[in-house]
């Protein structure tokens, strides 16, 4: 448990640092050059950020595999993908603490539905309805999420 908290803290710090450095470098490049030839520098930074993000995701996968000790393709369904996208949209892009807050809310939500005394089949459907309603509400009224710095609107 202590090791996983250290890894979570390190990846949180690293992702916050990457976000700040990435936008800072893009700002400097755009200030220094009014025209970047064929977006050479910008695309290399985008590739670098993608590789670092994939590396951090692989660390999360390794930690999951270690604790579960068995992974199969059936372990990851479309519902897990929707759950993760919901966390990012509701929490907000560009801020790690918004995603942490949204993850806490979306993990506590099914537990709160247990106290209502609904059968598990109805509670599962209600959870999906609440996820959908939260996504619609956030996209309409707060497109930057809880604490997000960047909006999904154009």
Image (cartoon, helix red, strand yellow):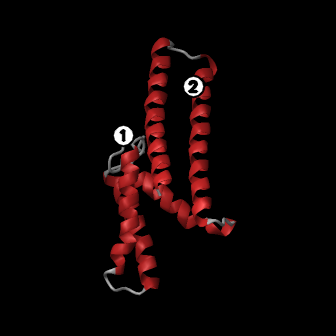
Q: Is residue 29 above or below residue 5?
A: above
Question: Where residue 59 sits in the image (x, y, percent)?
Answer: 58, 49
Q: Quadrant of residue 66?
A: bottom right
Looking at this rendering, what residue extends furthest in the right direction?
A: 72
Question: Where residue 11 sits in the image (x, y, percent)?
Answer: 49, 43
Residue at point 61%, 49% (across, down)? 58
Q: Nearer the viewer, residue 134 or 44?
A: 44
Query: Residue under circle 1?
Result: 149
Residue at point 43%, 31% (across, down)? 20
Q: Is residue 108 left or right of residue 2?
A: left
Helix, strand, or loop for circle 2?
Answer: helix
Count up the numbered dots. 2
Residue at point 62%, 33% (across, down)? 47
The answer to whether the residue labelled 1 contacts the one labelled 2, judged by CB atoms less than 8 Å apart, is no
One can see residue 39 in this view: yes
Residue at point 45%, 77% (across, down)? 125
Question: Where residue 86 sits in the image (x, y, percent)?
Answer: 45, 58
Q: Is residue 19 left or right of residue 47?
A: left
Q: Is residue 80 left or right of residue 140?
A: right
Q: Is residue 58 left or right of residue 98?
A: right
Q: Is residue 82 above or below residue 100?
A: below
Question: Where residue 144 sits in the image (x, y, percent)?
Answer: 36, 46
Looking at this rendering, what residue extends furthest in the front direction?
A: 2
Query: Residue under circle 2?
Result: 42
One can see residue 77 in this view: no
Q: Where is the C terminus found, in terms of image quarters?
A: top left
- Badge 1 density bin: few <14, some 14–19, many ≥20, Cα 10 Å: few
Helix, strand, or loop for circle 1?
Answer: loop
Q: Nearer the viewer, residue 86 or 60?
A: 60
Q: Quadrant of residue 113?
A: bottom left
């Amino acid at each position: 448990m202590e090791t996983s908290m250290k890894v979570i803290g390190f990846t949180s710090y690293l992702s916050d640092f990457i976000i700040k450095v990435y936008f800072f470098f893009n700002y400097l490049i755009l200030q220094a050059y009014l025209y970047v030839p064929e977006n050479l520098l910008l695309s290399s930074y985008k590739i670098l950020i993608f590789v670092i993000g994939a590396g951090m995701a692989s660390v999360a996968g390794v930690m999951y595999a270690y604790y579960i000790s068995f992974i199969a393709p059936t372990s990851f369904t479309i519902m897990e993908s929707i759950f993760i996208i919901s966390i990012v949209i509701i929490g907000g892009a560009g801020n790690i603490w918004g995603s942490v807050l949204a993850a806490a809310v979306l993990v506590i939500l099914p537990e709160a539905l247990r106290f209502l005394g609904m059968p598990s089949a109805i509670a599962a459907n209600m959870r999906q309805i609440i996820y959908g309603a939260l996504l619609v509400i956030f996209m309409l009224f707060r497109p930057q999420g809880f604490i997000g710095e960047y909006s999904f609107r154009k």
